[in-house]
Image (tube, coloured by chain):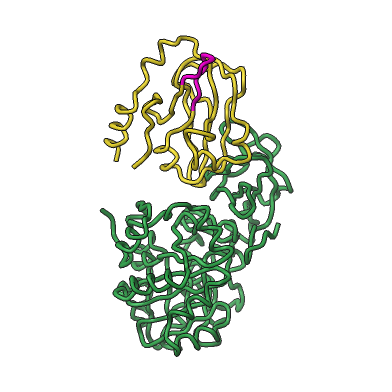
Amino acid sequence: MSNVPQELRYTKSHEWVRREEDGSVTVGITDHAQELLGDLVYVEAPEVGTTFSSGEDCAVVESVKAASDVYAPVSGEVTEANEALTDTPETVNSDPYGDGWIFKIKPADEGELDDLLDADAYAEQIAAEE
Amino acid sequence: MGKRTPLYDTHVEFNAKIVDFGGWDMPLHYGSQVKEHEIVRTHAGMFDVSHMTVVDLQGERVRDFLRYLLANDVARLKNPGKALYSCMLNEQGCVIDDLIVYYINDQFFRMVVNASTRDKDLAWIEKHAGNFGVSVKERDDLAMVAVQGPEARDLVHEVIDSAKQQAAAELGQFFMAMFDDDWAIARTGYTGEDGYEIMLPGDQAASFWQALAKAGVSPAGLGARDTLRLEAGMNLYGSDMDETTSPLESGLGWTIAWEPAERDFIGRAALQQQRDAGIKNKLVGLLMENKGVLRNHQKVLVEGLEAGEITSGSFSPTLGQAIAFARVPATIGERAKVDIRGKQVDVKVIKPPFVRNGKACI
C-alpha cells in the first residue's frame, strides 16, 4: 500500500501539496506516483520566477521506463526548485514527501488550495485505479 | 489475463511487478530495475525467458534448409553445439525476426526465436521446411532461464549435477551442451556479460529458480534486460528492425554471409540490390552528455533538419547517461541533436556497444 500522509493535499494527477508558513506551497509527486514510475533518473524542475496556471505542466520526472509531466496544483509563481534532484533524482523514490520535493510555488489565489483533494479522497482515487 | 510461463507463481512470490509483454504476463522488475541491472553487471542475475519460442528442426536436409532460410550461413557451424546469430528475411530483404540457431548434429538444429513473432515465424518456417522434408517442432514443454553476470557460471555450477557441471564448465563462448532431450545449457545471452541460457522442462523451472536464488543469484526483470542489451549494443526486434527495414540499415550487416556467392537464401537478391544502390541509412549509437533521457521515436536532427529517429532510447545505469540507437543517414558525422520535448539537445554519435563485460567501452 502506498503512503498517503493525512496532513497533505493532493491532485488527481498525483502531486502532493504542503502549505508552508511563508505562504508558499511545496509540491512533489506522491508515493503512489513514484512507485508506478520506478527508479527515477532525471528530474527537470521549473525555473524560479516562472508563472503557471493550475493544471499546466511545469516539471518532468523521468524513470528508466517513462517520462511523466508534473502539473502545477495551483496557479502562481515558482519561488524555489529542488536543485539537489539534478544529481540525485532517486531521492524522489526514497523520500517522496521529504527531501524528494520538487518545487515551491506562491499561490496567486489561496482559494484554489481548497479545490485540492484531501488524503482520504486521494487514497480512494488510487484504490479505485488499482 | 495473459499467457503465463511456468515461473509465473514464482515471480509473484518474489514480489515482481507484472506487466503485459506481447500477450505474456511477465516480470518488469522485482523492486528496482536499476539495482537489477547493476547486479547483472557486477554479480549474477537471472531472467525468465520462457516466453521465447524454442523450435527443433530435424531431417536429413536440415542444413540445406537453414542455408536457404537464414541470411547468416549455418555452414559456418563446424562443431556440434556451436550457435550462430542470424536474421530471417522476407523476399524484400527485410527482417521477419532475429534468432539464435544451435547446431546439435547433422540432422538436428535448434532455433530460439522471439515471443512476439511466434505465430508468423512458425508459419514462415513451416512454409519452407516442407520442401526440404524438415520437421518443425515447437518445444513449448521447455522453460528457459538466462543467468548472466561475472559470477553467473560459477553459481549455476553449484546447483546442477556433476555431469552437467563438467560439460558446462568446458563450454566455449557461444556453445551449447544438450542433456537427453529436455535439458540444454548454452553459453549465450543478451546482456553483454558471460553466463548461460538454460532450457529445461517447465515443471522443473520453479525449483531450479529457487535453487539459484538460494545460491545467490538475484531475479532480474525485463526492464533490466532491456537496458543491459542496449548498453551491450544488441538490437531488439520490433524496435531496431522489423519487416520494413533491412539488416544493412539496422547495424546487422555483419550477420549476412555473402560468401559463398552461389548460396541462395531468402532475401539475397533484394539485399544485393540495396547494396548496389548504396545504403542510405544506418543504425548508430547516441550518447547524451547533458542530463535527461533519450526515448524511442524522438527525432534526430542534423544541421537543424530532421534526419532520423531513435529506435531504442533509455538511461544507461552503468554510464549514468542517456544512450540510444538511432536510424540516421549513413553520412552522419560525430555530432547530432535530438528533439526532446521541443528542445534541441546535443548528442555524440558513436559505434555501439556502450558497455561490455562490466566496463564502459566508449
Seen from this angle, which residue lies furthest right? B334
Per the rendering, the colour in which chain A appears is yellow
Q: Nearer the viewer, residue B312 or B223?
A: B223
Q: Nearer the viewer, residue B121 or B244?
A: B121
Where residue A61 sits in the image (x, y, percent)? 52, 36
Q: Nearer the viewer, residue B12 or B280?
A: B12
**Residue A23 falls within the magenta-colored stretch:** yes
Q: Which residues are magenta?
A: A19-27
Residue at horizontal 61 percent and vertical 49 percent from the top: B323
How many callouts does the rendering have?
A: 0
**Residue B169 falls within the magenta-colored stretch:** no
Where residue B188 sits in the image (x, y, percent)? 52, 73
Please state if B102 lies on the left or on the right of A119 as rendered: right
Residue at horizontal 41 percent and vertical 16 percent from the top: A113
Where residue B138 sits in the image (x, y, percent)? 33, 74
Where residue A53 sits in the image (x, y, percent)? 48, 16
Q: Is residue A49 above or below residue B33?
A: above
Please state if B111 lies on the left or on the right of A89 as rendered: left
Which quadrant does the C terminus of chain B fall into?
A: bottom right
- Residue B235 image-quadrant placement: bottom right
Per the rendering, the colour in which chain B appears is green
Residue at horizontal 33 percent and vertical 77 percent from the top: B201
Please state if B168 lies on the left or on the right of B279 as rendered: left
Residue at horizontal 39 percent and vertical 24 percent from the top: A9
